[in-house]
Amino acid sequence: MNDYIIINPKDNVAVALRDFKKGEVIANVTLLEDLPRAHKVALKDIKAGEDIIKYGYPIGHATADIKAGEHVHVNNTKTNLNDLFNYEYHPHFDVVSTIKKDATVDVYPRSSGEYGIRNELWIVQTVGCVSGIAHKIIDEFKRRYDTSAIDGVYTFNHPFGCSQMGGDHIMTRTILQDMVKHPNAGGVLVLGLGCENNQVSVFKETLGEYDHNRTRFMILQESKNEIEDGVALLKELYDQMKDDKRVTKPISVLRVGLKCGGSDGMSGITANPLLGAFSDYMAANGGTTVLGEVPEMFGAEQILMARAKNEEVFNKTVELINNFKAYFKNHDQVIYENPSPGNKKGGITTLEDKSLGCTQKSGHSVVCDVLKMGERIKEHGLNLISTPGNDLVATTTLAAAGCQMVLFTTGRGTPFGGFVPTIKVSSNTPLYEAKPEWIDFNAGALVGEKTMNELLADFVDYICAVASGKKTTNNEKNNFREISIFKDGVML
């Protein structure tokens, strides 16, 4: 087994797959200093100003002369990136190959034509100040009734829905409305207070098409006994959904979000390429994947733009990128103030380094559509969506778009989960072994244990088991179910 990797023949750095000591040899180069796992070493002398090449692309330039065998990192490397760009459409479509594997899932059909992978009863709060009552209603409902016929009763705390203006108010309402129509919910009680600006009456009027049999609305200030009234409404919904049955469908009915967080230098070598291989598999089989984290596309965006299926999708991708850059500039923030301290400790040096690793999750398939934040999925295949890199906001946005689950790669580890099953995929085996209560699947097996095709086959089986209710994710076992909604404006 190799204990280092040169990702692309064009690269002038190698990545360590274990901790190395000064004097050891990598690719016939003697190390001039200790090298931690997932960090980079120069394979040849690199002059100041010369590009550092990884993944076959520049990830920045040397800020000083670097000798062969020296550690290449933040002390001697800086990003090449700069503000806004003018882009041109130069389509380049890769030849995409994937494993031949028929796969099915057992899912819940919904009146919308979508399919849920869970049959849960939700309280969606229009405003944060009703969260305490929402939990009390659920506690009392579960005390009175056996809920074992469904997959659980949940509410999702958030601090919004009041004192918001303009776009923030609309975004909060839109994301919560998307949740009401999510196929993983067999029934939804929309719970409001009564005096908030996210009024239940307007929420209902602007909700669009929804299943009236599976949705109820309640305003606490209009109720004489909110616990009794809330329990009664949950019972009505429960009676509607308790006999729902799973049906067997091809894996193409799945819509899967792609996300990474707490990345390390192995993320772009193991876990993210595994998600990319899965995304290609889904596209080849008529399924849908969605990639967010726009600031972590910066530096790799032109790779995605070249895969846009037509000029319309290309233009939407340009708008996606430049709008997010403008968001940074409007707040007088540096566009490329990334990666995070944890990323750097894990071996990621510049935003290009991070982005080229992050976008590995998209695989090689055609980009079929680009979604604004709050929009729901319309096209099969690979989609892009506007989200920040923030784990909770991005995961919430992916799920609100209609993803029944989110695949979340990590090299550092994180315990959180979204309001849909959130599958944590470790980039390295030590993390998988250290945090079994956080991590669901180990992509570190790609280092010397399994080939990509072998691990992809295992991964497809695992995804199908989770989607079919045969396995639960760690976030579900731990009952870590969080939401966070994008905010960009004034709070009253």
Image (cartoon, rainbow, N blue to C red):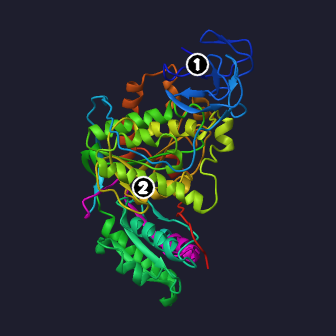
Dot 2: within a 10 Å radius of its alpha carbon, few (fewer than 14), some, or many (20 or more) residues?
some
Residue 94, image x and y in percent? Answer: 33, 31
Task: Choose mark 1 or mark 2, whichever is in front.
Answer: 2
- Residue 319 numbered tag: 2
Residue 210, image x and y in percent? Answer: 30, 71
- According to the image, label 1 marks what residue? 4
Q: Residue furthest top?
A: 28
Q: Is residue 106 left or right of residue 16?
A: left
Residue 256, image x and y in percent? Answer: 38, 48
| Circle 1: residue type | Tyr
Residue 6 appears in view = yes
Residue 107, image x and y in percent? Answer: 30, 51
Of helix, strand and loop, which one carries label 1? strand
Please name whichever residue, 145 or 236, is drawn nearer the observer in this view of the structure. Answer: 236
Q: Quadrant of the C terminus?
A: bottom right
Q: Is residue 407 magenta?
A: no
Q: Is residue 33 left or right of residue 298?
A: right
The boundaries of the magenta stretch are: 111-140
